[in-house]
Image: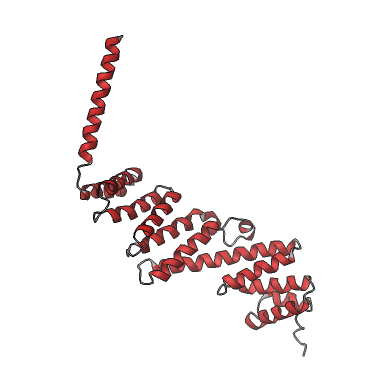
Amino acid sequence: MRRLIRLCLIVGLASLAACGRVHHKVHHWPASRFYAHGIAALKSANYPRAIRFFQDLEADYPYGRYAAQAEIVIAYAYYKSGAPTAAIGAARRFIRLHPADPRAAYAYYLEGLVDFTKNRGVIEKVFGVNQLRGRDTTAARAALRAFETLVKKYPQSRYAVDAAERINYLTDMLARNNIAVARYYYIHGAYVATAARCKRVIEHYPRTPAVADALGLMAMAYERMDMTHLSRDTARVLLRNFPKSPYVRALRHAHVLPARNAH
């Protein structure tokens, strides 16, 4: 029994020694070799292995010319591996450590992209009022902030055009979401909340088509609260800017706006 235990210890120590030799050998690689192996793992979609190579590169060569590139590629690898929180954390770390680096533009873009796709189900259902009402739009708003920062700080970046398109998409989606919530409040008699949601759309998303709905719902909510002056003023703004809005007819029917043939 003692011989068996001794033999197991010898085998275990030999294995540890071998592992130590391999580890020692790997950590004497030049930075370029770490990077090459990381890129190879990335191309073969072995993202955990790629991340390990890039992390080892950072550990051994924290100030080398490959280190910063490894940091940004780690963020991408986390994104591709389906780890959004880690991807955003790595992107923000790069921005914090290298605020003046031109590659920070990609870090902002990646951060926005991760949040953009995180709640894809919400975004893809943008036209479904029932599906949108009550959904958490935190990720969409975070994506919007990241893309807006990118466009503002790096307008000449190769990612700026795509970021601007996503900004338009997200802005429209968030405005529609607020209108969906406002309609829900209106149907259930919460007219103060309706007006507040509509005001948010007008203030935060003034260039979206949802502004027409916001003005119409707000005028109707004011009318239900017997706030006649506010209702009529809002309705006039709607009529002047969106004369074909379906709310115009509803407001005429409610006598908030004069009839079409009235003088």
Left or right: residue 127 compared with residue 95: right
Please provide percent x and percent y for residue 212: 63, 74
Depth order, front residue of 91/128 = 91
Residue 8 appearing in the image: yes
Q: Which residue is rendered at x = 23% and y = 41% of the image?
A: 27
On screen, 80 above or below 223? above
Please provide percent x and percent y for residue 152: 42, 71
Left or right: residue 137 compared with residue 69: right
Which image quadrant: the C terminus? bottom right
Which image quadrant: the N terminus? top left
Left or right: residue 262 compared with residue 137: right
Residue most toward the top? 1
Q: Which picture quadrant has residue 9? A: top left
Depth order, front residue of 68/246 = 68
- Report the number of discs: 0
Depth order, front residue of 227/81 = 227
Please provide percent x and percent y for residue 211: 61, 73
Residue 44 appearing in the image: no
Q: Which picture quadrant has residue 226? A: bottom right
Depth order, front residue of 22/246 = 22
On screen, 69 above or below 239? above
Please provide percent x and percent y for residue 260: 74, 85
Q: Which residue is rendered at x = 78% and y = 77% of the image?
A: 228
Left or right: residue 259 compared with residue 116: right
Q: Which picture quadrant has residue 255? A: bottom right
Indicate the colouring scheme: secondary structure
Q: Which residue is rendered at x = 30% and y = 56% of the image?
A: 68
